Image: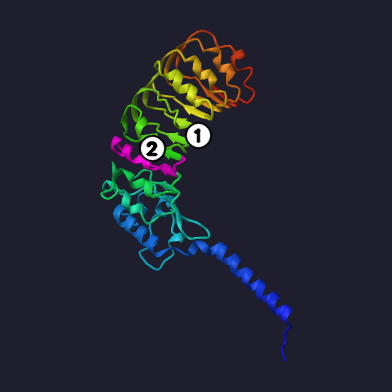
Amino acid sequence: MLMFSLPRFFCATWITVMMMMVSLQMHGYRCCLQTERKGLLELKAYLNISEGLLELKDNINSSYFWPTDMNSDCCQWKAVNCDITSGRVIGLFINYAYTVPPLNLSLFYPFGELRTLNFSWIPCSYWYDDIYGYESLGRLKNLEILEFSSSGLDSSILPFLNAASSLRTLVLRGNSIEGTFPIKDLKELRNLEVLDLSRNRFSGPLPDLAYLHKLEALDLSDNSFSVSSETKGMIVHYRSNLRELDLSGNGLVGRLPLCFGSLTKLKVLDISSNKLNGTIPSLISNLTSLEYLSLSNNEFEGFFSFELIANLSKLKVFQTFI
């Protein structure tokens, strides 16, 4: 004779199954793929990430020591982010390593679901791929965030960027990229929302980024851009979505173009540390969405009238001549 009833049995079974499913969802990231584990270890060897790195930086950076055990769970490794259900690697955050050879982009082929790649402070100078060449980043079809800050990169990496058409955020801050703005190398990045090219060596007129119609934040600070006759068209194309614009530290000369007054959705505008002159134009009063405005360290003349910012009800930070 059965000591339990069928309803109770099925109820208990159902509860057990549900608990297993919840457990799998909670711990599914432990199902690290063998191919991706192998790829991470190859990347580790290439970058010379080892225990010696522990002595270089604080505890945050010391976490980049990955075990060599091929059976270990790479989703538990520091600086690696996995999807909680599939166990696929979706993020790599490696911010320090020893001096490495030029970066072979084929090292990222195993990570087909990669969404975020942050390789800041890694002195790799330039990229290469003997198989796919400039189309290499196109293999990472889910890549949305790419950051290579302070890595010593030069202009040779620019032709690789167009293939990364899925990008939403591109940060190349603090490198050695020089020349005029690389319009042709970014024209296919039509999903781009954040672009940070600050602290490089760009020069020439401010670019027309009409093709980046989703762009919301643009940081071109600490370069050598200039204001030209093309600036008006450039600014007009920014006005639909742009929320943050930083042009500080460029040595911009002359009067602030009136077309800046069309950027009515801007929340952040920083044009400090340039050589802009004349009186502060009344166009400032049109920027009613501003929360942060910096005009400091320019060559503006005359007295500042607070009437210019009377309409800026959302303004939280205002830096002027000081």
* Residue drawn at 41 percent across, 43 percent down: 146
Q: Is residue 271 visible?
A: no
* Residue drawn at 33 percent across, 37 percent down: 158
The relative height of residue 321 versus residue 42 in the rendered view (above or below) is above
The relative height of residue 268 versus residue 123 in the rendered view (above or below) is above
Residue 310 is one of the magenta-drawn residues: no
Q: Name the residue under label 1.
A: 214
Q: Mark 2 points at which residue?
A: 172
Task: Check disc 1: other Cα within 10 Å, few if <14, some if 14-19, many if 20+.
Answer: some
- Left or right for 46, reference 248: left
User: Quadrant location of the N terminus?
Assistant: bottom right
Query: Which residues are drawn in magenta?
Result: 145-168
Residue type at numbered disc 2: Leu
Counting from the top left corner in percent of width and height, residue 127 is at: 29, 44
Residue 312's disc is none
Instruction: Give the alpha-carbon distance from disc 2 to disc 1, as whole Å.
Output: 19 Å
Q: Is residue 204 visible?
A: yes
Q: In which quarter of the image is residue 125?
A: top left
